Image: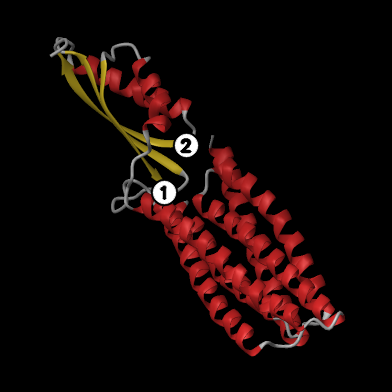
Amino acid sequence: MVDVKREEERQSNQLAYYSLALNVVLTAVKGIVGLVAHSDALLADAAHSGADVAGSIAVIIGIRVARRPADADHPYGHGKAEEIAANLVAILLILAGLDVVYSSVAGVITLSTAPDQVALYTAIGAMLAKEVMYHYQIRVAKRVNSPALDAGASDHRSDVYSSLAAAIGIFLSLLGKWNHLSVLLLADPIAGLIVAVVVVHIGYQLARQSYRTLMDQVLDEGSTHDMIAVAMGVEGVLRIDDLRARSFGSYIVVDIKLSVDAEATVSAGHHVAKEVKYQMMKRFHSVSDVFVHVNPYYGEE
């Protein structure tokens, strides 16, 4: 189990650094090409990637802090650090999107010239790179159950949509340039505006999800049904009075109240509680700790 955890940590850290390197490269390339090729959409996409750099750094820090063991001040561990990192990614996405709105509206008003063809190739290349990175990261995020990596994967997918919108806008602007249709020159800044809407929407969805977890929202009944079944399967458990499971980043902590025979000894009740904790942690890989409260059962009251 220790080796599995260590391998998961290695993969998470490695992937976070890969994402950071990719975002740095894309920010530089999009920004330089956007300036040289006069593309508002590509510059907007570069601003998005710039926010991704800060987001990737937040993910790296969040993963590092979350992997620290529990201590006296943090008995539940440091898993919420991943949720904080996910929330920072969401905020940066929203801010980047709002910045793109401003620049795109300015581009529509000024009606800038059509971009050069290299801007189209850059947008397509960025889109393909981010799509590959998305599929790789989402697989790892699901395997290690990492909210920070999952948020980063969603960020990669938003980049795909962002670059796609930029590519379409750039292509339509080039068509307008080649066919002397001035109205199509608006496609580039309008594409930037579409990029902004997508980015802000994805940022809002991420922020809402991480906020719920940070506020200690318990898992819903459907997610805890199997946990209750495992606890009820332990010999000596006569009733489950309450079960609350909370997410702490990549792991879950469970609080459970159960009833045993009122005539049972304290030692017997303690044995049942230990067995429930053992079976829960054995069955559910994401459960890191189980706190069991034992009540006396006097029959149906």
* Front residue of this view, candidates 36 and 80: 36
Q: Is residue 289 left or right of residue 28?
A: left
Vertical order, 2 against 22 (above or below): above
Above or below, comparing residue 278 to residue 160 in the picture = above
Judge whether residue 286 can be spotted in this image: yes
**Label at residue 286:** 2
Mark 1 or mark 2: which is in front? 2
Q: Quadrant of the N terminus?
A: top right
Task: List the residue tagged with mark 1.
Answer: 69
Q: State whether residue 25 is above or below residue 83.
A: below
Q: Earlier in the sequence, mark 1 or mark 2?
A: 1
Separation of marks 1 and 2 at Cα, in angstroms: 15 Å
Answer yes or no: is residue 61 visible: no
- Which amino acid type is marked by label 2? Ser
Q: In percent of the image, x 64 and y 44: which residue is there?
A: 139
Number of other residues with Cα within 10 Å of mark 1, as a class: few under 14, some 14 to 19, many 20 or more:
few
Q: Position of residue 47 (x, y in %)?
A: 61, 76
* Mark 1 residue element: loop
* Residue contact between numbered discs 1 and 2, judged by CB atoms under 8 Å: no
